[in-house]
């Protein structure tokens, strides 16, 4: 099942604040990560909107992009190959 970025963006913004554009970029990156199959292959679980929200809840305080990049950095250290999913720029 594909991860739908639109509802995820709303959930992220509601949970962690930040600009609408920022939450949309994070949600698109999450959808791209889910579509790649990399997370499922490494972790053994499907990447869902609930999983993204839960993982980002574990991150230190910050906006959705701050939290996402923290989590992607953790995945990069653990498995490698996740840097391409980091958020580098977004329009507020």
Image: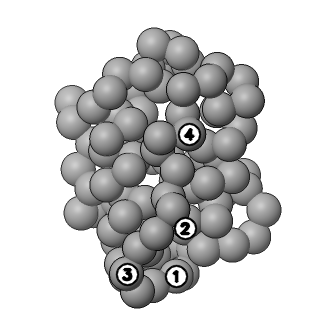
Query: Residue at horizontal 54%, vertical 26%?
Result: 81
Determine the secondary structure under disc 1. Answer: loop
Query: Residue at horizontal 57%, vertical 55%?
Result: 68
Q: Distance between the residues labelled 2 and 4?
A: 16 Å
Q: Which of disc 4 and disc 2 is earlier in sequence?
A: 2
Q: Do the residues labelled 3 and 4 touch (CB within 8 Å)?
A: no
Classify residue 37 by image quadrant: top left
**Residue wearing tag 1:** 18
**Residue wearing tag 3:** 91
Vertical placement of residue 16 versus 8, above or below: below
Q: Which of disc 2 and disc 3 is earlier in sequence?
A: 2
Location of residue 54 in the rendering, given as x and y in whole percent from the top left corner? 58, 49
**Residue wearing tag 4:** 83
Q: Are marks 2 and 1 in contact (CB under 8 Å)?
A: yes
Q: In which quarter of the image is the N terminus?
A: top left
Vertical placement of residue 38 versus 60, above or below: above
Q: How far apart are marks 3 and 1 (CA)?
A: 11 Å
**Residue wearing tag 2:** 64
Q: Distance between the residues labelled 2 and 1?
A: 6 Å
- Residue 46 visible in this rendered orientation of the protein: yes
Q: How far apart are marks 3 and 4 (CA)?
A: 20 Å
């Amino acid at each position: 099942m594909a991860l739908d970025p639109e509802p995820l963006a709303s959930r992220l913004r509601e949970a962690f604040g930040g600009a609408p554009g920022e939450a949309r970029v994070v949600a698109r990156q999450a959808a791209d990560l889910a579509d790649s199959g990399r997370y499922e292959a490494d972790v053994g679980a499907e990447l869902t909107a609930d999983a993204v929200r839960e993982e980002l809840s574990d991150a230190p305080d910050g906006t959705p992009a701050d939290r996402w990049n923290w989590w992607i950095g953790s995945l990069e250290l653990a498995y490698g190959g996740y840097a391409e999913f980091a958020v580098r720029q977004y329009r507020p």
